[in-house]
Image (tube, grey):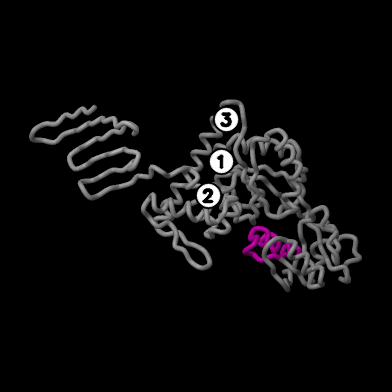
Amino acid sequence: MAVRRREARTPRCELSLEYLPGLSLFESYSYPGIFYDQRLYSPNTLFLGRAISFKYGGMMELRHLRYFVAVAEELNFTHAAVRLRVAQPALSSQIKDLENEIEAVLFERGRTGVQLTRAGKTFYTRARNILAQAAAAANEARTAAGMITGSLALGFPSGLHLNYLAPVIESYRKTTPQVSFDFVHGLNTQQLRALREGRLDVAFVTLPAPLDGCAHRVILRVPFKVVLPTTHPLSKRARFELADLRGEDFVFCTRESRPEFYDEFFRQCANAGFRPRVVKEVGGYPTNMLGLTSVGLGLSILPHFQGVEQIRGIVWRPLSKPKLWTDFALVWRQPAASPVVERFVATAEKILSAPSDPDRAEL
């Protein structure tokens, strides 16, 4: 069967519907100089004139975008394969198929890893937005049906902090078993950047911190104590004022690792009448400073978590003046948090409670 309409002098729209035994129905739309054809052997192809064609991505699926985003963020096929729980050859093949589909090279391959091309950087922004919109649409549909499902990417600065959240996570899994967790380690700056970029749903950070555009709830308040080597002459004292540590050697964090904490500590020492003599600065988490203290390099003032007394070669002593504490908070994006995030924060508030202590200095 064929239906055709054509004017003698000026080419206009041509519509043809043909049925071939053994093949499915296909359509053809023709305009001056442009031809659109949808067939089994040539799907979703737009022909411009007689020689130019443009494929607009008929074979692309969400999994291709997930694979691409993973490689773009890891910049390493092996690491991305582990993250996706797929075989590396299969991942490489899928990325190659995607590049063929969109007719653009997305990665520059090298011996030590890959880098995004200009096309890849542009595609990455769009791909992440599409995946986020698809996940949001699915979650909204499930929520409308009375279910809370999806995934929760949770940041944490150390194993000690994550262990503190263990009761919250356990309770949340019991009440919301359809939600899966992804745990992401990172310092304050790393977590907050990932949160704003949409790679984290909830961050667990130390305050103070720049929280513009975010909401937060304090769930943990930890006192600072003096930590000394067991061989230190002052290790027998029961407690300290900050002024008592004038003239001592300090092991402390780098300013780059925790600028707010670093500046506030030096301000408190200035208020006590001295500038601390820091003999060694170390980045990363405070456990690095504990190791240096345990071998006698110097003393420090650090947040005191339950269980850290088990580290050999150190003793903890209360700091009575000034009373220094640090707050740890869950942070999430505003204005609209997902039901997954709202339920997790509510669970944390129910199980954990930070004591109020207005007579303190916050670090």
Tell me the residue at 66%/48% (across/down).
204
Q: Nearer the viewer, residue 333 or 82?
A: 82
* On screen, residue 89 above or below 171: below
Q: Determine which residue is flagged by label 1.
A: 334
Q: CA distance from mark 1 to mark 3?
A: 22 Å
Q: Residue furthest left?
A: 9
Tag 3: residue type? Answer: Arg
Q: Nearer the viewer, residue 32 or 232?
A: 32
Q: Secondary structure at mark 1?
A: loop
Left or right of residue 134: residue 300: right
Q: Determine which residue is flagged by label 2.
A: 197
Residue 262 highlighted magenta (yes or no) = yes
Q: CA distance from mark 2 to mark 1?
A: 13 Å
Residue 210 visible in image: no
Tell me the residue at 34%/33% (across/down).
22
Left or right of residue 34: residue 115: right
Mark 3 Cα shell of 10 Å, populated few (<14), some (14-19), many (≥20): some
Residue 101 x, y percent position in the rendering? 39, 49
Q: Quadrant of the N terminus?
A: top left
Q: Earlier in the sequence, mark 3 or mark 2?
A: 3
- Magenta segment boundaries in residue numbering: 253-272
Residue 81 x, y percent position in the rendering? 57, 54
Q: Secondary structure at mark 2?
A: loop
Tag 2: residue type? Answer: Glu
Tag 1: residue type? Answer: Gln
Query: For the residues carrying marks 2 and 1, which lies nearer the camera in this image?
Result: 2
Residue 100 x, y percent position in the rendering? 39, 53
Residue 83 x, y percent position in the rendering? 59, 52
Magenta span: chief secondary structure: helix
Q: CA distance from mark 3 to mark 2?
A: 24 Å
Q: Determine which residue is flagged by label 3.
A: 142
